[in-house]
Image: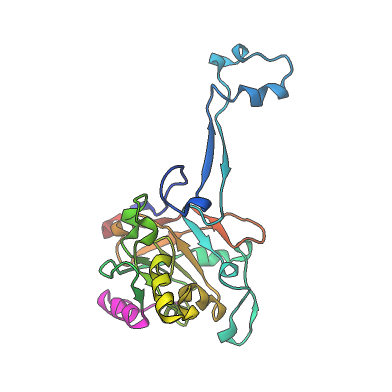
């Protein structure tokens, strides 16, 4: 069978709008001409011209937050405890503890590009979209939402782009056995700039991060800052998103990809 792999990940790169400025990635590049000072201490007496073509190695120093780039959030990111609604409240799982079988499963894409930036998706919206694509959820499927924000990656308004998944919408998925979700937006929830306005109007702190906080009731993971969701079919593909193994961390970077039969395109 012919297989196709689609990259669902954004770059880790400098000088592109991908995160708030204080949390942006910082990458320092050393090319073959500028790395000699790193090599020389290993080999006393070595001169740069002694190396083939006078070239050393290429290497990079990277200063990252665990939530830079396309990454997988662990339940620990959302709250200190999880699974309250399942009757066994327990310490939240960190990224190194996430079950690996959650990270390679059939994918389902929900298309929410028609919703305005800042809109909070409801359980009824999820149910309607599943009816439209004629799909019944199965436990452990990876459900991703295409908000259209991925097309605005790097643009000045990227952090404000896309709709968000509300508490009820998230719980609708979790109650049906979904344990890993994803979005092409900066956050699973509505962009903060929109939620901040609603909070100022209502004083209701329950609106803040409501989709994430569903993890208090049922532990789950989600992918953020995905890319290329527009090219995927609604079903018929697998997603691979194994996170980097960072001890005790709230998230881990991943090269998320979709794997599917290219006849589905």
Where 179 falls versus 3 (above or below)? below
Is 34 placed left or right of 12 in the picture? right
Whether residue 138 appears in magenta in the rendering, the answer is yes
Where 57 falls versus 261 (above or below)? above
Instruction: Looking at the picture, tell me which residue is in the foreground, 246 or 131.
Output: 246
Is 46 placed left or right of 138 in the picture? right
Image quadrant holding the C terminus, namely bottom left
Spot the residue most to the bottom.
87
Is 254 placed left or right of 144 in the picture? right
Q: What scheme was used to colour the molecule?
A: rainbow
| Residue displayed at 74% across by 18% down | 44
Image quadrant holding the N terminus, namely bottom left
Q: Is any atom of residue 135 visible in this view?
A: yes
Whether residue 42 appears in magenta in the rendering, the answer is no
Q: Is any atom of residue 259 visible in this view?
A: no
Q: State which quadrant residue 244 falls in.
A: bottom right
Where 110 falls versus 5 (above or below)? below
Residue 225 screen position, x and y as percent: 42, 58
| Residue displayed at 46% across by 80% down | 203
| Residue displayed at 44% across by 64% down | 187
- Total marks drawn? 0
Residue 192 screen position, x and y as percent: 43, 66
Instruction: Looking at the picture, tell me which residue is in the foreground, 104 or 227.
Output: 227
Where 27 falls versus 152 (above or below)? above
Residue 42 screen position, x and y as percent: 72, 24
Spot the residue most to the right.
44
Q: State which quadrant residue 87 falls in.
A: bottom right
Residue 38 screen position, x and y as percent: 65, 27
Magenta highlight range = 122-139
């Amino acid at each position: 069978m012919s297989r196709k792999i689609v990259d669902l990940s954004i770059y880790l790169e400098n000088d592109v709008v991908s995160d708030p400025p204080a949390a942006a990635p910082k990458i320092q590049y050393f090319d073959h001409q500028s790395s000699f000072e790193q090599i020389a201490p290993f080999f006393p007496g070595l001169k740069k011209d002694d190396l083939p073509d006078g070239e050393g190695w290429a290497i990079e120093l990277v200063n990252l937050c665990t939530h830079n780039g396309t990454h997988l959030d662990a339940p620990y990111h959302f709250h200190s405890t999880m699974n309250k609604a399942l009757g066994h409240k327990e310490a939240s799982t960190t990224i190194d503890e996430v079950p690996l079988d959650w990270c390679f499963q059939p994918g389902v894409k929900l298309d929410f590009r028609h919703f305005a930036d800042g809109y909070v998706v409801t359980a009824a919206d999820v149910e309607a979209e599943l009816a439209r694509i004629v799909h019944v959820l199965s436990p452990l499927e990876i459900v991703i939402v295409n908000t259209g924000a991925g097309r605005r990656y790097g643009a000045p308004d990227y952090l404000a782009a896309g709709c968000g998944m509300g508490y009820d919408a998230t719980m609708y998925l979790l109650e049906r056995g979904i344990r890993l979700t994803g979005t092409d937006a900066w956050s699973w929830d509505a962009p903060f700039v929109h939620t901040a306005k609603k909070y100022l109007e209502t004083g209701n702190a329950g609106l803040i991060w409501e989709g994430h906080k569903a993890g208090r009731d049922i532990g789950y993971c989600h992918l953020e800052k995905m890319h290329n969701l527009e090219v995927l079919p609604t079903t018929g593909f697998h997603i691979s998103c194994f996170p980097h193994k960072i001890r005790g961390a709230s998230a881990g970077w991943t090269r998320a990809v979709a794997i599917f039969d290219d006849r589905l395109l």
